[in-house]
Image (cartoon, helix red, strand yellow):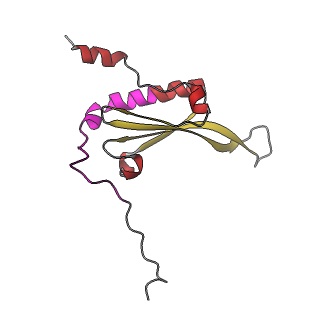
Amino acid sequence: MKDRLSQWKEFYMIFVPMLHYLQNKNSFSGNEDGMRYLITPGKRSVPDPDGSEEAKKEEAILTVDLWPEPWTLDKTDPALRRREIFPMTEEGRTAVAQYLNDAYNAEPERWSAHPSILDCEPWTPPAPEPDAETQH
């Protein structure tokens, strides 16, 4: 027989705020047992089907970043990060919640096996290559 936590997790959905909150340019971050995520509202240019060949229009989107603990997004190796984009609609908000749940449930051991912040160093970008002009 499954324990109560396993039974509960089958029906649990990661919280995603109401669409109105996101439409007001509010980001939302969270954590689920080692999986960190950030939902950021924004816009992108897409071809306008009603305009000329080069016409563009803006589309409201939700960008979802997820990464393993223990560091913030910018201190986590880009190879460990994931990013998906969804339309800023109620269907898009629901898809964000489903995406986060699917990502967590697909790899629970990945998320729960994160190191302690005391046992690892944050990722730092590689040093830029020196310019040929600056090397005399």
x then y, percent, for residue 53: 77, 47
x then y, percent, for residue 97: 46, 26
Total marks in image? 0
x then y, percent, for residue 98: 45, 25
Q: Quadrant of residue 136?
A: bottom left
The residue most toward the bottom is: 136
The residue most toward the top is: 1
Question: Which residue is drawn at the image coordinates 35% and 59% (left, top)?
Answer: 124
x then y, percent, for residue 51: 80, 41
Q: Quadrant of residue 14?
A: top left
Residue 63 in the image: above or below residue 132: above
Residue 97 in the image: above or below residue 41: above
Question: Which residue is drawn at the image coordinates 24% and 51% (left, top)?
Answer: 120
Quadrant the N terminus occupies: top left
Does the stretch in magenta take in 113? Answer: yes
Q: Quadrant of residue 47?
A: top right
Does the stretch in magenta take in 117? Answer: yes
Question: Which residue is drawn at the image coordinates 57% and 29% (left, top)?
Answer: 21
Please state the extent of the stretch shown in magenta in the rendering: 98-124
Tell me if 43 is positioned left or right of 113 in this view: right
Question: Which residue is drawn at the image coordinates 63% and 41% (left, top)?
Answer: 43
Residue 92 in the image: above or below residue 11: below
Tell me if 116 is positioned left or right of 26 in this view: left
